[in-house]
């Protein structure tokens, strides 16, 4: 799989290089950007750079924004995972305390004897059954 990724990346780089080479008149032409805010004294003209430089700057800004966004998502997911892990730990603590409480009742021979006597006499630990009333016609 790594070799396939490398071949695909190499093909993409060759295609971009070929595109730039065939259009080098456009990509290596120098253009100067100017900024005017409507006030006569607020005019700025930046030094001319290649069009390829503008593409590179836009690509770098896009990658930077994407990196910051991914970093914030990763931080948020780590915080969520920590919260969920603490919930798991609290639930496991509750489960272990309930198990020890249950062992106290199951290990007591007197409680076992009384439970056996109840089952022999026909009593169960459940609520008595109630008959449902027939619907009135």
Image (cartoon, rainbow, N blue to C red):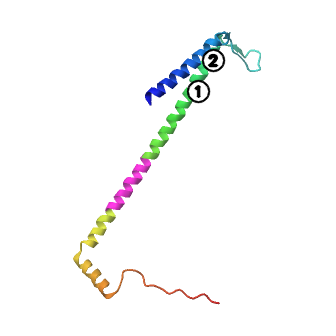
x then y, percent, for residue 9: 51, 24
Above or below, comparing residue 117 to residue 57 in the picture: below
Q: Residue furthest bottom?
A: 137
x then y, percent, for residue 116: 27, 81
Camera-side residue: 3 or 75?
A: 3
- Residue at (37% x, 53% y) in the render: 89
Q: Based on the displayed image, in which of its 4 quarters is residue 14 positioned?
A: top right
Label 1 residue SS: helix
- Residue at (36% x, 82% y) in the render: 124
| Residue 102 within the segment the image draws in magenta | no
- Residue at (58% x, 19% y) in the render: 15
Above or below, comparing residue 21 to residue 132 in the picture: above
Magenta segment main secondary structure: helix
Q: Residue furthest left?
A: 109
Tally of numbered tags? 2
- Residue at (24% x, 81% y) in the render: 113
Q: Is residue 80 left or right of residue 92?
A: right
Q: Where is the N terminus found, in terms of image quarters? A: top left
Q: Is residue 36 left or right of residue 91?
A: right
**Mark seen at residue 92:** none
Label 2 residue SS: helix
Q: Which residues are magenta?
A: 82-96
Q: Where is the C terminus found, in terms of image quarters? A: bottom right
x then y, percent, for residue 31: 68, 11
Q: Is residue 99 left or right of residue 1?
A: left
**Mark seen at residue 62:** 1
**Among numbered discs 1 and 2, the one appearing first in the sequence:** 2
x then y, percent, for residue 77: 48, 42
Q: Is residue 38 left or right of residue 62?
A: right
Which residue is label 2 attached to? 54
Spatial CA span between label 1 and label 2:
12 Å
């Amino acid at each position: 799989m790594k070799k396939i990724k490398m071949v695909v990346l190499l093909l993409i780089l060759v295609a971009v290089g070929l595109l730039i080479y065939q259009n080098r008149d456009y990509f290596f032409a120098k253009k100067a950007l100017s900024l005017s805010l409507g006030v006569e004294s607020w005019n700025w003209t930046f030094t001319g750079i290649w069009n390829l430089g503008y593409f590179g700057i836009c690509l770098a800004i896009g990658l930077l924004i994407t990196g910051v966004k991914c970093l914030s998502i990763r931080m948020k997911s780590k915080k969520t995972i920590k919260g969920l892990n603490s919930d798991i730990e609290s639930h496991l603590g509750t489960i272990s305390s309930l198990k020890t409480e249950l062992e106290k009742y199951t290990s007591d021979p007197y409680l076992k004897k009384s439970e056996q006597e109840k089952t022999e006499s026909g009593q169960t630990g459940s609520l008595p059954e109630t008959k449902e009333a027939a619907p009135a016609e």
